[in-house]
Amino acid sequence: MGIARWQRLGAAFVLAMMSIGGTAKAADYPDRPIRLIAPFPPGGFTDVVTRRAAVTLSKALGQSVVVENKPGAGTNIGTEYVARAAPDGYTLLVGTSSLAINPTLYPHLAFDAQKDLRPVGILSTTGYTLIANNDFPASNAAELLAYAKKHPGEVAFGSSGNGAVNHLAAVMFMQQADIKMQHIPYRGSQAALTDLLGGRIQLFWASTLEALPLLSSNRAKAFGVTDAAPVSALPKVPALGATVPGYEAIYWMGIFAPAGVSDDIVDRLSRALQTAANDPALKTYLTESGAQSQFMPPRDAAKLLRDDTVRWGEVVKVSGAKVE
């Protein structure tokens, strides 16, 4: 047998062994704790959902899933950290709608979410509840539109930050309803809610979890939810889309890995994420918070990210929001 043939056989053997080794490695995954990077501060709704999901993920994977908060720059610090991590499945990201918003909002990102991250799946979705100060003269969405058209630019709405999802949800509402209102950005939702109750702003697109105690104590009134239909936590509050046809603003969260992670590991993680999404305790918590468990596999999650990047990008441009 010639030297060239021995070289070809040797190369084939090496490739085969590399393949077997790679398969074995994927089959053993995970064999140590997994870090789940949460690019937002601890204590909020998304953080609570993340930590509850991590418990179920740990059971499904047979290894600890440790949540590590890396907040800052509108989730970009934690996101870039994962995008640059080794693609071995041991460093994962809790990705939210911010992945679709930030490419337009931040003109100088150091990563590309669609190229540098690989979706594992979507875990849940949630909308917002448009609440108003009790002294505001309108009592429903239709009356709000009539009032805003009669008093253009006079109605003030707050947001939890320039370019935040609830800011953009309001911009989308104004655009589709053809009204003009004044935007007052805050550093987080609590300051905005304080000013809403004090009468310094009239409207706020609140997470349903934030809205529930204010509505139950009659300290604010609800005009509608941004979901396509009423949510079980607020069954008597209509969808804003009933007044402004086609209006819907949804916030999603899921798990993402560095782009180079293997198909086998993504499949393993995706099945575990589906188990977490179907966990009765987590589903109950989400429902009571005005959210819902909505598992999407990797392919659907990738499409959602692509579609929402275009959709929210257009809203960001209309809003004029930019963060340098």
Image (cartoon, rainbow, N blue to C red):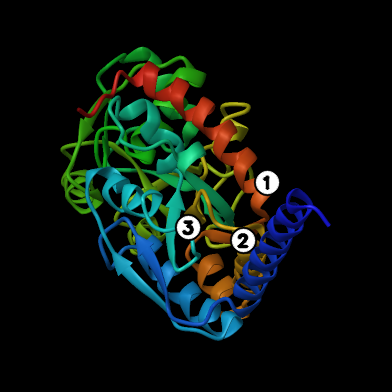
27 sits left or right of 155 in the view: right
- Find residue 84 and report its horizontal and vertical position in percent: 36, 50
Circles 2 and 1, Cβ within 8 Å, touching? The answer is no
Three-letter amino acid code at disc 1?
Asp
Amino acid type indicated by mark 2: Val
Q: Are marks 3 and 2 in contact (CB under 8 Å)?
A: no
Q: Is residue 237 visible?
A: yes
Location of mark 3 (residue): 87
Earlier sequence position, callout 3 versus callout 2: 3
Q: Which residue is mark 1?
A: 300
Q: Residue at x 35, y 61 (%)?
A: 38
Q: Relative to the observer, which residue lies in front, 83 or 1?
A: 1
- Indicate the quadrant containing the C terminus: top left, top right, bottom left or bottom right: top left
**Disc on the earlier residue, 3 or 1:** 3
- For label 2, the residue is 266
**Residue at image coords 27%, 27%:** 108
> Is 43 left, or right, of 275 in this rendering?
left
Q: Secondary structure at mark 1?
A: helix
Residue 41 drawn at (x, y percent): 25, 60
Q: Which residue ends up furthest to the right in the rendered image?
A: 1
Tell me the mark number nearer the camera, choosing from 3 and 1. 3
Q: Do residues under tags 3 and 1 come within 8 Å of each other at their CB atoms? A: no
Q: Residues within 10 Å of mark 2 (few under 14, many from 20)?
A: many
Q: Is residue 141 above or below residue 57?
A: above
Front residue of this view, candidates 323 and 120: 120
